[in-house]
Amino acid sequence: MRILLLGSGGREHALYLKLRESPLAEKIFVWPGNALIAREDRVNAPAVVDNFSALEAFIEREKIGLTIVGNEAPLVHGVRDALKAKFPGHYVFGPDKRGAQLEGSKVFSDAFMREAKIPHGESAVARSLGEALELLPQQSLPLVIKADGLAAGKGVSIHHDIEGAKEKLEEIFIARTFGESGSRVLLQKFLKGQEASLFALVDGKDALLLPTAQDYKRALDNDAGENTGGMGAYAPSTDLTDEQKDFVRTHIIQPVIDRFEYRGLLYVGLMIQSEAKDGVAVVEFNCRFGDPETQSILPLLEGDLVEYLLWTDNFDVKFPIMQYGETLRLPHRRGACVNAVIAAKGYPAAFEKNIPLSFPENKNRNLQIIGAGIEERDGHLISTGGRVANIVAYGKDVAEARQILYAYLEDFKNCNAKTREKFYWRSDIAQMRQA
Ligand code: GLY
């Protein structure tokens, strides 16, 4: 089958590497891809967001059988609906526009969770600065402010004082830092606990769980610094018990399936709260694989990813599934994966672009070098984004994976003597887990 994968980040590179293992994958195009994704399969065109005519022409010309939507923007704009209308027999991985609103609008998602009685942080909606300032005195600190629409992972901020919260609200409503995405905001109670990301592949009826991962959202070690799109992740995370997984499956994932006939990947961002009634609360829903969690999850997954993704869209296929209590899970191998993001200094605020970089030779088959905001010009690699690359290491346990990962990052520093001050990464990914 000829496959098209949409996106250009580390997540898409990780998906590409796993898809490539499938005997079903005759050819894989990545649109637009990045410099570290195999060049011959890359589509040199701007990323697909909301105009699908060029995409449809490409699918027709290249006889694509399966389109995998890696990033959220095309899903929120209805790429599945458009492709299914144009090519009824075409397989698409990702939910329809209605299901994707769970990520596309935080206000929509919050209202759905309230109605479906899904545990989540108490919240209030503001449609103007005036409304937000009126609501502010009733909120407890720390306070989470969420821009309603898509904001490239930057729309959520945590505030420990009212002054900082006011400044943020002025930025959103007056300076319009998030444009239309900030025309409404959620003021939400901060949830304390341990975060976990749980991904389920869903076919409109059933859900297959992938190994749980832990994402590191803050920019700096010890969870200091700003919120980012994610600075690293490890999998599997054992923080979520089997009973909690059953609870999430029955009381969180099933209501989503029932309401939206959801298919594709459902990302459930959770806060594990041992003292709370249900033990977990939802932080966010996303309608696609997480980045950088995917980079640590996929190397652990056994079986054929192409089959799994086709299954979500009614492709008749049988593969081994493991059952624990109420939950169906995909098989995965023993061991652990840890990844760290190499970011441009300054990220997630303003950062320098076009920094030359190179990667030391990879001599370890348990290590992957994953591209994200990176391009090639005149035969040289340069950074183009805030998250530039990921280094992913597999080990028999977390300690071994960390050792492989950080030894390579030390080599990366030495290999980039002239520019190494322009990059940073967290040195504490999975540190607590290595014992
Ligand atoms: N790692 C957070 C996200 O993918 O949204």
Image (cartoon, rainbow, N blue to C red):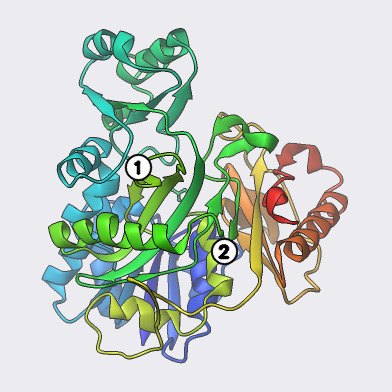
Residue in view at x 62 percent, y 76 percent: 334
Q: Is residue 309 left or right of residue 373?
A: left
Which x, y percent locates residue 103?
A: 30, 47
**Amino acid carrying mark 2 in the image:** Pro
Precedes in sequence: disc 2 or disc 1: 2
Instruction: Examine the rendering and report whether any part of residue 289 can be seen.
Output: no
Name the quadrant of the C terminus.
Answer: bottom right
Q: Depth check: give the residue in front, 240 or 216.
A: 240
Q: Is residue 329 left or right of residue 362?
A: left
Task: Please tell me how crowded label 1 is: few (under 14), some (14-19), or many (20+) other residues with Cα within 10 Å.
Answer: few
Q: Report the mark closest to the observer, 2 or 1.
A: 1
Which x, y percent locates residue 42?
A: 48, 69
Instruction: Give the secondary structure at mark 2.
Output: loop
Residue in view at x 33 percent, y 49 percent: 285
Q: For residue 277, which numbered disc appears in the image?
A: 1
Residue in view at x 28 percent, y 69 percent: 202
Name the quadrant of the N terminus.
Answer: bottom left
Q: Depth check: give the residue in front, 204 or 321.
A: 321
Residue in view at x 73 percent, y 77 percent: 365
Mark 2 lies on residue: 236
**Amino acid carrying mark 1 in the image:** Lys
Q: Is residue 251 above or below residue 66?
A: above
Q: CA distance from mark 2 to mark 1?
A: 25 Å
Q: Is mark 2 within 8 Å of ligand 1?
A: no
Instruction: Examine the rendering and report whether any part of residue 212 can be seen.
Output: yes
Q: Is mark 1 within 8 Å of ligand 1?
A: no
Instruction: Give the secondary structure at mark 1.
Output: loop
